[in-house]
Amino acid sequence: MLLISAKKTSSTIQATMPLHKHSVSYFLIAVHLILCPCYGLTSINATNDMLCEKYNETMCNSNGEGCNGTEECKPGENEKGNLCYVLWQNNSRSFSIKLKGCWVGSHDACSNRNRCMETRREPNVQLLFCCCEGSMCNRKMTIPSNVFSPTPAAAKTSTAAPIRMASSSRQIRNILLFTLLPFITITVVVAIGCWVYRRHKMALFNELPTTDPSPLPPPSPLLGLRPIQLLEVKAQGRFGAVWKALINNEPVAVKIFPYQDKSSWIVEQEIYMLPQMKHDNILNFIGVERRGDHIQVEYWLISSYHERGSLYDFLKPTSGNKK
């Protein structure tokens, strides 16, 4: 029994040993298969990674520090490859670099794969872009020969400036024309209207004649004292007294002014001597006289006599009775 058991045990060990060897082999193969892709990717990354010069104008200080550097490029998710780029600005007379670094895009987008050069020029564009393939290929860039030529926008501005100036001057002229022309026209029309109106008014205006076509015989005050006989005082006022008197038995009215009222006597006789003062409804003026000497002098004004007195004295009691 012991021998049989020993034989069985040895046979079992011999049977299991080949199986163990195969299991180890399978395990090593599985590990190799798992690790191989990782090594493959690492090798791919090692071969595809590259460096590009990095620059950002906004990150630079006044001393120029922190501007230039390097950037490690890796494949993007789109698997189009790694590129370096330069973004720069054209100012017609100079250029300034804005950005540098890695770029993910198609190789066909670059004008030249070995160096950064932009040959395509679009109008009205001042920011230009170039890309290249290879480590640090964007360190040096090639500027197109026509980069310093005036941009189309500048050319349009230079040619359009005189046109705009001419247009603005034409607009100013039109504004002045449409503003001043109506004002001048209205002024001329008003001036002509005033002139015509004055001419028409002067033609209709009858000027008061300075001479009487039928003058009164001039009174003869001071040529000699008339035979005047004073009868009674009819009225007394501020500037003198009115007397009823007789001249050759004809009743007359005599207004006597004292010495201090000589000016009133002169004014009244000038009024009666005005042209066209001879009328039936106006008191008939006969003449004036000066009586007495020195401070005793009196100034007489002689007119026709009306029994009912002045119009004011006649209307005053009449209007009172009507009330």
Image: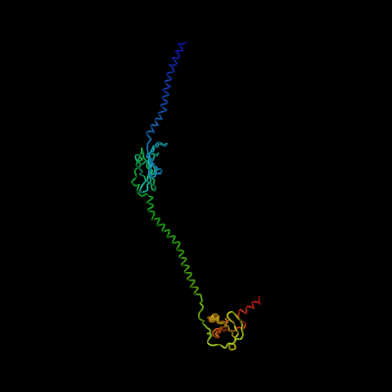
Occupied quadrant, residue 96: top left
Left of 110 or right of it: where is 257? right
Residue furthest front in the image: 295
Locate residue 82, reporting x and y percent.
38, 37
> Which residue is more in the foreground, 217 or 146?
217
Give the image quarter of residue 281: bottom right
Position of residue 132 in the picture relative to residue 253 (left or right): left
The one nearer the camera, 296 or 145, is 296
Q: Is residue 174 above or below residue 2?
A: below
Return the x and y of residue 160 as percentages of the image width and height: 39, 54
- Rendered image coloring scheme: rainbow
* Count of number-bearing discs: 0
Q: Position of residue 56 (x, y in %)?
A: 40, 42
Is 155 left, or right, of 205 in this rendering?
left
Where residue 20 sits: x, y (%)? 43, 20
Compared with residue 86, is residue 266 higher up or lower down, i.e. above or below?
below
149 left or right of 219? left
In the rendered view, would you say 32 is above or below 125? above
Q: Indicate the quadrant containing the C terminus: top left, top right, bottom left or bottom right.
A: bottom right
The answer to which image quadrant residue 255 occupies is bottom right
Judged from this view, the residue extending furthest toward the left is 145
Above or below, comparing residue 77 to residue 18 in the picture: below
